[in-house]
Image (spheres, rainbow, N blue to C red):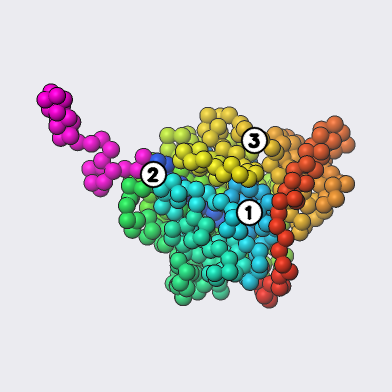
Amino acid sequence: MQRLLTVLSILAALPCPALSAEAGVEKATKTNFLVILCDDLGYGDVGCFGNKTIQTPSIDKLAAEGMKLTACYASAPVCSPSRTGMLTGRTPYRVGVYDWIPAGSPMHLRRSEITVAALLQKAGYDTCHAGKWHCNGRFNSPEQPQPGDLGFDHWFSTQNNAAPSHRNPVNFVRNGKPVGPTEGFSSSVVADEAIGWLEKRKDPRRPFFLFVCFHEPHEPIDSPAELVARYPQAAKRGEALHHANVTQMDSQVGRLMQALDRLKLRDDTLVFFTSDNGPETLDRYAGAWRSHGSPGPLRGMKLWLYEGGFRVPGVIRWPGKAKPGQVCDEPVCNLDVLPTFCEIAGVAPPADRALDGASFLPIFAGKPVARKQPLYWQYDNALGWAKLAMRDGDWKILADAKQTKFELYNLRQDIGEKQDLAAQEPERLKTMAARLKQIHAQVQAEGPRWPAAKKPAKGERD
């Protein structure tokens, strides 16, 4: 007994390897999560995805340090549904968010839904939302759940876009209290909040989930003059403003990465950078004259069910797991965030409801994602004839609302969806159409019906 006590006393006197000598606190043993979500950033708007004009050094560096996802998908070709899909791991039409949500709308992410933030919060994670929320119409009102009701300890958010523009926005709310006028450009304001939250956490030993939702480059676009001046070659009205807006956002991605380094958080943090949908169409409405986003080699843009509507830039940096400079062609969707983060954190995902995402952990070993069902998209207000789409492996089917008209593409061979193979592949078309019909019926049966909503205010857009 005396010998045992002596050994224990010696061990107690030894320095603990889990302690940080500099910080004097125990390092977090669980993986931290930082999700950076842009608004209307197109597949072709970033240097590492082929843009030769727009300067995005921070995102390019992030991709060089981690994994570039060349088949990264949003769960919808428009804002609000895409965000609810990412938070819940469920196809937005199951959740009941069918389109972008105007201010005052009854449509919202219901309290009965379980978000990735709520699951991680329950597992001991600190959670923060900074930026665009757009998951309800009655923002900062007890009539509908707010970010704080859906898993976020701290929130600094706007209902929809930064207003009146990205310059000096006035519509942020912090934990239920309107902030009033802020100085600076929206992405800087959002990054300031996110970094400040990281620095001021009461217990830095706790793991965190930080959800940073930039407004850029969504209209109404405004950009710093010094960044606009970097694009003297821009010949079209609003082009330099757009490009500078992306560069402004990129600089704040850089600031976030610098903060992780300064706080010794890089090695313990999975960073996922992506966009909520494809790029806005130039001059689609009166205020969209600065919308010079690019889908790159993809067909279609925001609001379409061709690839350009929801295939978006994707980058993951996860030291020790994602090899620097790695490129992944495996389809990954924002629906996969919830099941993936749950698996990493050792948290059980909800078992009482359908989940449409799957863990993307296999991609780090060069293996495919094990999906129970194909990726599925529905947008009844989509531009063009197609309102439904589904990707299964390399193949994608598009259908009209009544599922009487179809197109079929091999995306591995035809990323631009130029050659419709429906006539050449009748058996494949028949099989995929039947699967699409089955998923559509399940989703339609689950989604709620909302009371009639008033029309959006004049000038309000997504």
Give the mark, 3 or 1, whose residue is nearer the N terminus.
1
Which residue is denoted by mark 2 in the rendering? 266
Kindly tell me whether residue 454 is visible in this rendering: yes
- Label 3: state its secondary structure: loop
Which of discs 3 and 1 lies nearer the camera? The answer is 3
Looking at the rendered structure, the kind of residue marked 1 is Ser
Marks 3 and 2 sit apart, C-alpha to C-alpha, by 30 Å
Disc 1 marks which residue?
Answer: 82
Return the x and y of residue 445 as percentages of the image width and height.
75, 50
Gap in Å between the C-alphas at discs 3 and 1?
19 Å
Q: Is residue 14 part of the magenta span, yes or no?
A: yes
Query: For the point 60% across and 39% down, which residue is it?
Result: 358
Q: Are the residues tagged 2 and 1 within 8 Å (C-beta)?
A: no
Which of 262/239 is in front?
Answer: 262
Q: Is residue 44 above or below residue 9?
A: below
Residue 397, given in percent of the width and then of the height, sits at: 78, 41
Whole-percent x, y for residue 317 in the image: 47, 42
Label 3 or label 2, whichever lies nearer to me, is 3
Tell me the residue at 84%/35% (across/down): 430
Of the two numbered discs 2 and 1 in the rendering, the one whose residue sits closer to the viewer:
1
Residue tagged 3: 371
Mark 1 burial class by Cα count in 10 Å: few <14, some 14-19, many 20+: many
- The local crowd at label 2, few if under 14, some if 14 to 19, many if 20 or more residues have their Cα within 10 Å, is some
- Horizontally, residue 213 falls left or right of residue 289, namely left
Element under label 2?
A: helix
- Identify residue type, mark 3: Arg
For the N terminus, the image quarter is top left
Point out the stretch of residues depicted in magenta: 1-29
Identify the mark nearer the N-term, 3 or 2.
2
